[in-house]
Amino acid sequence: MDKLKEKSSSLVQERDKLTAILSSMTEGVLAVDKEGKILLVNQAASNTFGLRNKVMGRPIWEVLQNEQINPLVKETLRSGEPQISELTNLSPSEKVFRLHITPIRDSQGELGVAIILHDITDLKKLEKMRVEFVANVSHELKTPLASIKGFVETLQEGALNEPENAMRFLSIIERHTNRLTDLINDLLSLSKIESGETPLELKRIKLLPFINKTVATFDDRIRKKRHSLTVNVPDGPLEIAADKALLDQALSNLLDNAIKYTPPGGKITVSATDTAVHIELAVSDNGIGIPEQDLPRIFERFYRVDKARSREMGGTGLGLAIVKHIVLAHGGTVRASSKLNSGTTFTLTFPKAER
Ligand SMILES: Nc1ncnc2c1ncn2[C@@H]1O[C@H](COP(=O)(O)OP(=O)(O)OP(=O)(O)O)[C@@H](O)[C@H]1O
Ligand SMILES: [Mg+2]
């Protein structure tokens, strides 16, 4: 009798263990017997299908009423063969699942089926992003290439003998070639930073002289647009540990935008502050601003508020994506605030350099 008690209590323990494991799984698990009656449903599966009432012992076809799953379960019960499929349209959820249907046999050799749902929504999102990225790159390459080809043909068809036109066409070709080179360089530097392939060359950088030096390379453009530029960095040794070339690129991209997207005679400020927790570097302008609905997306590659206008200015929408990845590589964060028609501020935060 004691033996029997022992055995039954160890069985209970085993069952509790199994239940605990199944309910902690992120994968949804269901099992049905040879008639399709439900033997087991874990928490993840009940959440996915929104199962509330008692479902044990009820036929899966009635409980799920899912046109994707039911035929597959029937097929596996009939053939004893495992199947893999993808499950979508589980409205209202927009999740995508990989569905594994596997035959199971109990000790008497009776057939049943286990259904396992693996959430692959993130994977699908990444896949979609990759496809979009390739489409975007191709599109950006195609436009200048088509134009180069057009002007080369015009030259070949006789324009070469009209010196004035020929020179003009050549400079258009040159402009598009430069654009292609810029685009490729941006893509290369983005993938280099993102892959983490080349380690950062961290050096202590004194912010005031660093900012002044980068700003100086924009003097001409700032003068031409009659902008006024202020550098606002407190006295004292404000330093960060950063890769100088990358930090220069990030600040340059922000300055480039501030100059580009501010009508002539604008105000641009570059400032650095020590917030005790980290060092903040900000570039503000009083330019055209960014509409609220676009703000969350501007750090995405190729995202431009006004595609036609930005492209006209030679932009491809990679500048801010590069800024973001540079800052992330330094363990920092980036944010933007903006008001349409009144201005934009980009703020980069960096961890404080260790003393
Ligand atoms: N300071 C700013 N003021 C207003 N809009 C801005 C500003 N900075 C960026 N934007 C908007 O965000 C978009 C993305 O900026 P990003 O720097 O990534 O691309 P871009 O300037 O168009 O091209 P690129 O920098 O690759 O030459 C811009 O097209 C523009 O619409
Ligand atoms: Mg830019």
Image (tube, grey):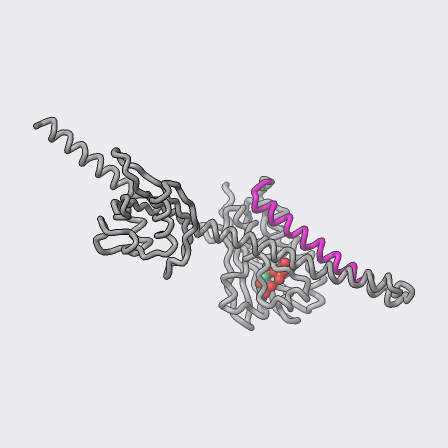
What x and y, as percent, mark residue 336?
51, 61
Q: Looking at the picture, how far across and down is residue 41, in whole percent?
A: 27, 47
Q: Is residue 191 visible?
A: yes
In terms of image quadrants, where is residue 40?
top left
Nearer the observer, 42 or 209? 42
Residue 269 makes an appearance in the image: no
Q: Main secondary structure of the magenta part?
A: helix
176 drawn magenta:
yes
Q: Nearer the viewer, residue 24 or 217?
A: 24
Where is residue 117? Give x, y as percent: 37, 47
Q: Quadrant of the N terminus?
A: top left
- Side of 325 where 311 appears, left or right: right
Q: Residue furthest bottom?
A: 341
Q: Which residue occupies 75% across, 62% down? A: 147
Looking at the image, the residue that sits furthest to the right is 161
Question: Which residue occupies the foreground of this view, 71 or 53?
Answer: 71
Residue that appears at 32% across and 43% down: 113
Residue at image point 58% right, 39% down: 199
Residue 181 screen position, x and y as percent:
71, 53
Magenta stretch in the rendered image:
170-197
